[in-house]
Amino acid sequence: MKDIFQDLFNKVFGFFRQAEKEENAKDTAVNRLRVVLMQDRTNLTPELLEKMRGELIELLSKYVEMDKDALELNFEQEGNQMALMLSIPVLRAKDEDEIEDQDDEKTSSENPEEEEQNDNSEDAQDQEPEKENSDETSEEEEQKIEESNTNQKEQKSK
Amino acid sequence: MSGRVIVITSGKGGVGKTTTNANIGTALARAGKKVVMIDTDLGLRNLDLLLGLENRIVYTIVDVVEERCKLKQALVKDKKNPNLCLLAAAQTRDKTAVTEEQLKNICEELQKDFDFILVDCPAGIEQGFQNAVAGASEAIVVTTPEMSAVRDADRIIGLLEAKEEIKSYKLLLNRVRPNLIKSNDMMSVEDVVEILSADLIGIIPEDTGIITSTNKGDPIVNDETSLAGKAYNNVARRIIGEDVPFLNLEEDRGVIAKVKKFFSGLIGKEK
């Protein structure tokens, strides 16, 4: 008897939950169009977006441990402005020693390459502004990381 | 006199470019303007059918370009309105028969004698589109509240923005179905305008009258009872420079609602 009621309850509850979740055809169209127009307008193909995602993961994992599969990289439109939104589920921030250790490992392994690059002065010049840019973005990301960290703390305290 | 050259384009086919051309042209002529329409869809001409002029065409734009006749000889006068003319496309030739430069020259010559030159653009973004746009300084982008039409309109807007000669472009939203929008099954006018971020010049409701008017070869603006005809007339008035508010497309629903109310009132009394 109890089982029957529970089953009925689940069915009724499930029905309402489904009705809530279902997106109407108009919203689906608007959302799909937004995504496809971003790609059309920027010439950013899904392949390039995937490549960018991979490189961002590589860069950010230097500073944080994250849930790589749940990382989201999407376009959003606000009026005429297009924004690239990155959402990173952070598991744990790395401490300074760990980051330094990684740096040492990298520089020691990259040393031979650097020497080669130094021979070609043009290459070295080209790389400098790129480095600056990546520093900027990582600062922004760190801010977001901080935010999501505090979110996690809040969740834990609950 | 230096007339305005307006190209009517869409990217996607079947959204109502030619219908829009025929109706805006007719509406402008009815408002006393001298109008010439150029069909640049070589090989796939249809504007003559919508105007009911298919049996009167002697010379086409290709005959003009290849100097088999004078430009004025090739202009076909409308049956009803002496202010309205058509320069037809050739049905037997392809898009390479006329160049951008030649179309530009034709537009310039027509500007001397007409208030409005409406250029009917073929679907697509290839040479046919480039030709049609060549002589124009304004554009009307026709789209419908469907994903593929909106996407193609976005592409066309991008191409128009890159053209220096095009000083302004406006959006015309065709085949709008208010009841589908109300039930959230179709993108609303606001959705499309926001996505394309372009100025709107008209909202035309889906209207079965368009089919019958096409069959008769008589543009729907000539039918004063039609809602789509009224909407097209308003577009023409906006082009001239009048400030006309957009139609409330639920007007006819309003009538039905009133009838329903009336009957429910009767039932109510019986009780």
Image (spheres, grey):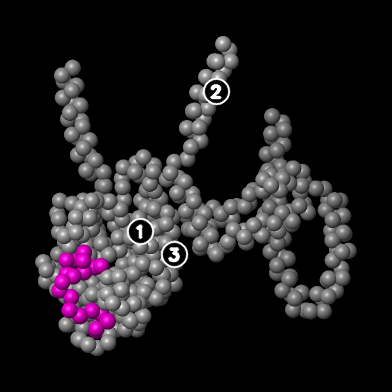
Residue B143, numbered label: 1
Name above or below for residue A48 compared with residue A64. Answer: below
Marks 3, 2 in one chain: no
Q: Position of residue A97 (x, y in %)?
A: 86, 51
Name above or below for residue A69 compared with residue B92. Answer: above
**Which quadrant: the C terminus of chain A?**
top right
Left or right, B193 with respect to A120, comes to left
Q: Position of residue A51 (x, y in %)?
A: 66, 60
Q: Position of residue B149 (x, y in %)?
A: 39, 58
Residue B57: quadrant of the picture: bottom left
Label 1 SS: strand
Residue B157: quadrant of the picture: bottom left
Label 3 SS: helix
Q: Residue at point 87% right, 68% down?
A: A111
Q: Residue at point 35% right, 77% down?
A: B95
Give the amino acid at mark 2. Asn
Q: Residue at point 14% right, 54% down?
A: B224
Q: Residue at point 23% right, 79% down?
A: B60
Badge 1 crowding class, 10 Å Cα cut-off, few under 14, some 14 to 19, many 20 or more, is many
Residue B177 vs residue B211, the one in the foreground: B211
Give the spatial CA distance, label 3 vs label 2. Answer: 48 Å
**Which quadrant: the N terminus of chain A?**
top right
Give the amino acid at mark 1. Thr
Which residues are drawn in magenta?
A: B46-64
Badge 2 crowding class, 10 Å Cα cut-off, few under 14, some 14 to 19, many 20 or more, is few
Residue A105 vs residue B13, the one in the foreground: B13
Q: Which residue is mark 2?
A: A10
Q: Which residue is mark 3?
A: B155
Q: Position of residue B191 (x, y in %)?
A: 40, 50
